[in-house]
Image: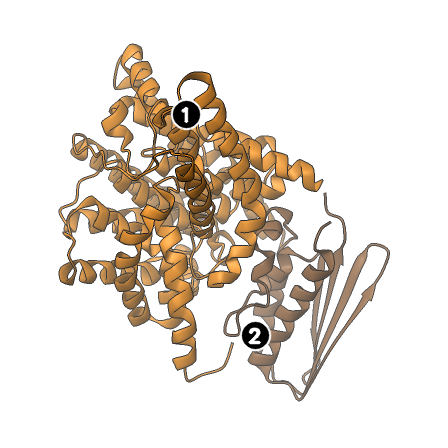
Amino acid sequence: MKHELKKVLKIADEVMTVCMYKFDPVKAYFTTEKCETGYELFFRFESVTVSDKELDDLREKLSAERNPELEDYYWQLAGEVENSNELYLVALMSDLSEVCYDGNDLAIHLSRKAEQA
Amino acid sequence: MEKAQSEELRYKKTLQYGIYVFPVLLLLVGLFSASPATVWKGLRSIIASPSVLLHDYLYVGGLSATLVNAGLCGIICCVLLALLRVELNGPFVAAVYTVIGFAFFGKNIFNIWPIFIGIALFAKVQGVPTRNYALVGLFGTTLAPLVSAIAFGSHLSGGIAVALGAALGVLAGFVLPPLASHMLRFHDGYNIYNTGFTGGIVGSFLTAWLRSFDFTVAPTSRLSDQYDVFLKVLLLGFFVFLMLAGYVIDRLGARVIAEKMRLIHASSGRLISDFMRIGDVPSSIFNMGFMGLISSFFVIALNGRFNGPVIGGILTIVGFAAFGKHVKNCVPVLLGVYLASLLKVWDGGSTPVIIAGLFGTTLAPIAGQFGALAGVLAGFCHLSIVMNVGVLHGGVNLYNNGFAGGFVASFLVPIINSLKKEDKA
């Protein structure tokens, strides 16, 4: 698929932008692994306060199914605006999402398969 | 959880078949409102018209043929989406209603096909399924008049004119997907009719080329006010039906609709705001009906007539009420355009001003994100810009307000952002 790496970086940009602005973490990490099927993306935001409502909202937005019809049109919007929240778009570009919060650190795992016919 | 999943499945099925209701209704009303000979004659006139802005098909082909054309265009879109196995959601509902709306003044059962073919060719060249570009394809019919303008409105004639028109349409369709995606960054999603902005750029390029080869491409104004009352009754009735349908499909009652509507109203509407996900299918359908009534009352309050372009504006709002538009982010823009018409040189009750208001709601996300005052300012600016950009593309880009909206959003949003105090997401 075209622009695959750029799309992965856009996803990373959006998640980092939303969480950095929203939760103001002391430390933030992003790592990615390239595997046979595509990319695994891991985010960690340390020393953050996330309410139950915010956590539900994160999970809900990231739970949308991957949608190539919308992805191919709108992917360039991800990570573009500082005061908006495009996690729904992130979900449309991801095959799997997991959100964990232990009361102090917030971890997000996204998985994106390279090919989606 | 299982109950929620079965409800979601039921909503999907409802949408899958429900999307046909409006185009089939238009088709049937059109077919039964005149003799087959009259419909056929009108349809031929519509197909053979140059179709550039503002060619009101009610003027060109009469009521029955226009309704048949709009119904058929809508059905063609729905069938194509079904064949491509596209899962319907807010963006696609918006796209289908936009095509139907513009099938009252610019899109017809002939000139939309070259655009579709261009999109399919692009998908083939890219090696991706055509359905990935289905949304751009439907919205991309904004450039359909390019086909008709050359085929039926140029100094060429016969097969050569039709072939050249079709070839230009295919070319326009072919270049739209990469450009539409790229142009989003120009306004950051604050101009909902992004394909209109893209179409304006492509249309301006192609029109400039055509003019350099001595083709005349220029906007015109052929409007009808003959069917005002009939169309008011038909559309207002349908919008009330939509609100009732949303309530009935919900099955859980008014309280749940109200709860979901609150979620929709909390959304800025900035691309991509799929209300069928932010709220749900019934509340989105309810919002579509409600926004249809709001936009109709805007026209009636300004003493406007229901003609092709005005109906196009109303139906586009109805479609986008599933994809970004609600009463809180649209009314400020409508008010801004109205206030502008009081101070500027244009008559507030004229069709160009009314459609500038209706289609100006492409800037609704500015009101949704930055507040009502910003929305009024956006509407106020929009009227001047939209009255001046049409000449660039000669009217071949039907979403002229989307073209203008791109400029307004890209001008206003950075300024508003820089004046904001808060820095939170």
Going by the image, does B111 lie left or right of A43? left
- Is residue B254 visible in the rendered image? The answer is no
Quote the CA–CA distance across marks 1 and 2: 56 Å
Q: Where residue A33 appears, x then y in whole percent? A: 82, 66
Q: Amino acid at mark 1?
A: Ala
Q: Residue at x 59, y 59 (%)?
A: A76
Q: Residue at x 37, y 23 (%)?
A: B47
Q: Residue at x 28, y 68 (%)?
A: B377
Q: Which residue is mark 2?
A: A54
Front-most of residues B326 and B205: B205
Mark 2 falls on what kind of element? helix
Chain letter for the part of the structure drawn in orange: B
Categorize mark 2 by other alpha carbons within 10 Å: few (<14), some (14-19), many (20+): few
Chain letter for the part of the structure drawn in brown: A
- Farthest-out residue, top: B37
Q: Which residue is mark 1?
A: B151
Which quadrant of the figure has residue B97?
top left
Mark 1 falls on what kind of element? helix
